[in-house]
Image (tube, grey):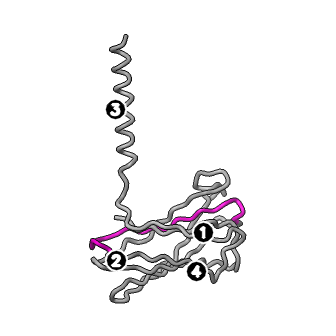
Amino acid sequence: MIRQYIYTLFIIVAASAGAAAVVSCDNKTVFHSYHHTIITGWEKNDTLSYSIPPLKEPGRYRESVGLRINSAYPFTSITLVIKQDIFPGKRSKTDTIKCQFSDERGYRTSNGVSCYQYDFPLKDIDLRRGDSIQISIQHAMKREMLPGISDVGFKLFE
C-alpha cells in the first residue's frame, strides 16, 4: 500500500515537473512592455512610444503588438500604425495593421469576461548588434476618441 502511494506520488511530481518545464520554455524575449491608455478614450493623436535599448546579439527577430480591450470598445477591429526608427543608421520601418477582435459571427476571438487580451504579429526584422529601436504606435481609425482600449504593448523576441 505504501509502495503504491509512493509510486503514485512520484508519478504526480514527475508529471508536474515535466509540465512546468514545458510551460516555462518560452521564446527568448528581448523586450516586452505595455503602456496604459485612458480607458475613456485613446485619442487619435496620442502616440504611444517604446524604446528598445541596444541589442547584445544580431539576428532575425520577431515582433508583435499586444492589445487589451474591454467591452466598451465599439468596433470589431482596430487599425494601428507602427513606426520604428532603428539606430544607428537611422533606418525606418512603418507597418499598418488591422487587428481583428471578432470572427465573422461577431464573437470575440480571445478569452475573457470583461477584459480581452490579443497579440498580433508583425513582420520579422533583421537587426545588428548594437541596434536600438524607437517605436511609436497610434490608431488610424476615423473616430478621434476610442473608448475601451486599456493597454497597448510591444514585444521583440527571437
Distance from the alpha carbon under mark 4 to that under mark 3? 48 Å
* Amino acid carrying mark 4 in the image: Thr
**Relative to 126, 39 lies left or right:** right
Residue name at image x 36 percent, y 45 percent? 22
Location of mark 2 (residue) = 54
**From the viewer's perspective, is residue 84 above or below residue 40?**
below
Residue name at image x 64 percent, y 54 percent? 107
Distance from the alpha carbon under mark 1 to that under mark 2? 24 Å
Q: Residues within 10 Å of mark 4 (few under 14, many from 20)?
A: some
Distance from the alpha carbon under mark 2 to that under mark 4? 22 Å
* Amino acid carrying mark 1 in the image: His
Which type of secondary structure does the marked residue at label 1 adopt? strand
Labels 1 and 3: the sequence-earlier one:
3
Residue name at image x 34 percent, y 77 percent? 54
Labels 2 and 4: the sequence-earlier one:
4
The label number, if any, that marks residue 14 in the structure image: 3
Q: Main secondary structure of the magenta part?
A: strand
| Span highlighted in magenta in the image | 54-73
Q: Residue 113 in the image: x percent, y percent?
A: 66, 51
Q: Residue 128 in the image: x percent, y percent?
A: 28, 78
Looking at the image, which residue sits at the far top? 1
**Relative to 91, 74 lies left or right:** right
Location of mark 4 (residue) = 47
Location of mark 1 (residue) = 36
Q: Which one is closest to the eye, mark 2 or mark 4?
A: 2
Q: Which one is closest to the eye, mark 4 or mark 1?
A: 1
Labels 1 and 2: the sequence-earlier one:
1
Distance from the alpha carbon under mark 4 to that under mark 1? 12 Å
Labels 4 and 3: the sequence-earlier one:
3
Q: Residue 24 in the image: x percent, y percent?
A: 38, 49
Distance from the alpha carbon under mark 1 to that under mark 3? 40 Å
